[in-house]
């Protein structure tokens, strides 16, 4: 069974520090990977996606993909209290299905 | 551009009652999905529709039925609601035919309580 695994947290990070969120996936045929942010009581919203090995940067966010290790991460630089949320990782398999992780709860301490 | 619209936003039902959750998207997406999310848990796929006229079961289909009314609309029906169906329901849509990098777009959710 295809799985995406995330540490449920909570991950507590001081304001201004780098938050590092990790995700592993079981299906080597996964084609692309997505990070979503979900505030309490709200719907998931897309932060960014990545499909090539290496880093992809968008503002304070950097996604990292290592296909050999089947590992995806999201770095948030200069963390702000507004970044406190649950972060969902998802992989898209070769059949175009999205496989979701359970999410990591991030808390940014002022 | 409204994106994905879900109705209602909140609903309280009694055990055994039926209801239909509505979802519509205006992004010309081919595929639509219904998820449930229980407290502290991730998204679990109930049903999906890869294209107009087709529907398929997801991970947790029992107790639910769906209808893909047209390309825009995808409804979820609870025929006889049970307390175990208390959850937040999200509808999503995407266009995977455009490639693997197409993200899913979500509605605001329906918060459903079964007493």
Image (spheres, coloured by chain):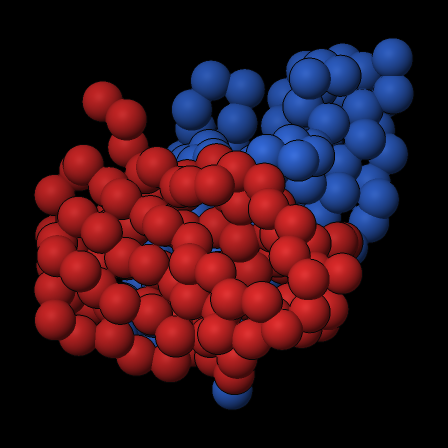
Q: Is residue A34 left or right of residue A38?
A: left
Look at the image and tell me whether residue B111 can be seen: yes
Q: Is residue B32 left or right of residue A9?
A: left
Q: Residue furthest bottom?
A: A1
Corner quadrant of residue A55? top left
Look at the image and tell me whether residue A98 can be seen: no
Residue A103 in percent (x, y) is at 66, 52
Q: Which chain is red?
A: B
Of residues A36 and B43, the one nearer the viewer is: B43
Quarter placement of the N terminus of chain B: top left
Residue B57 in percent (x, y) is at 38, 80
Query: For the point 59% across and 34% down, which residue is it?
Result: A42
Q: Is residue B29 left or right of residue A110?
A: left
Query: For the point 86% across and 34% down, which residue is it?
Result: A12
In this rendering, the count of numbered labels is 0
Judge whether B96 appears above or below A16 on screen. below
Of residues B66 and B20, the one nearer the viewer is: B20
Query: For the point 36% across and 50% down, which residue is it?
Result: B22
Residue A54 in percent (x, y) is at 42, 46
Of residues B101 and B90, the one nearer the viewer is: B90
Corner quadrant of residue B20? bottom left
Q: Which chain is blue?
A: A
Residue A43 in percent (x, y) is at 53, 38
Query: For the point 76% across and 61% down, which residue is it?
Result: B115
Judge whether B3 appears above or below B59 on screen. above
């Amino acid at each position: 069974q295809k799985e995406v695994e995330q540490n449920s947290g909570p991950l507590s990070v001081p304001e201004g520090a780098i938050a590092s969120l990790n995700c592993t996936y079981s299906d080597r045929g996964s084609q692309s990977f997505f990070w979503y942010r979900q505030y309490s009581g709200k719907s998931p919203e897309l932060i960014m996606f990545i499909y090539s090995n290496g880093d992809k940067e968008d503002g304070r966010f950097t996604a990292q993909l290592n296909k050999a290790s089947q590992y995806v991460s999201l770095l948030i630089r200069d963390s702000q209290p507004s970044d406190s949320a649950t972060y969902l990782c998802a992989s898209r398999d070769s059949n175009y299905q999205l496989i979701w992780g359970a999410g990591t709860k991030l808390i940014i301490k002022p | 551009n409204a994106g994905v619209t879900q109705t209602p936003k909140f609903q309280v039902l009694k055990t055994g009652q039926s209801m239909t959750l509505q979802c519509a998207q205006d992004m010309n997406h081919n595929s639509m999905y219904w998820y449930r999310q229980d407290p502290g848990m991730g998204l679990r796929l109930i049903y999906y529709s890869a294209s107009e006229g087709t529907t398929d079961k997801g991970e947790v289909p029992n107790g639910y039925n769906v209808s893909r009314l047209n390309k825009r609309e995808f409804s979820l029906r609870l025929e006889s609601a049970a307390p175990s169906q208390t959850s937040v329901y999200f509808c999503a849509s995407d266009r995977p035919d455009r490639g693997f990098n197409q993200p899913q777009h979500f509605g605001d959710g329906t918060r459903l309580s079964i007493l």
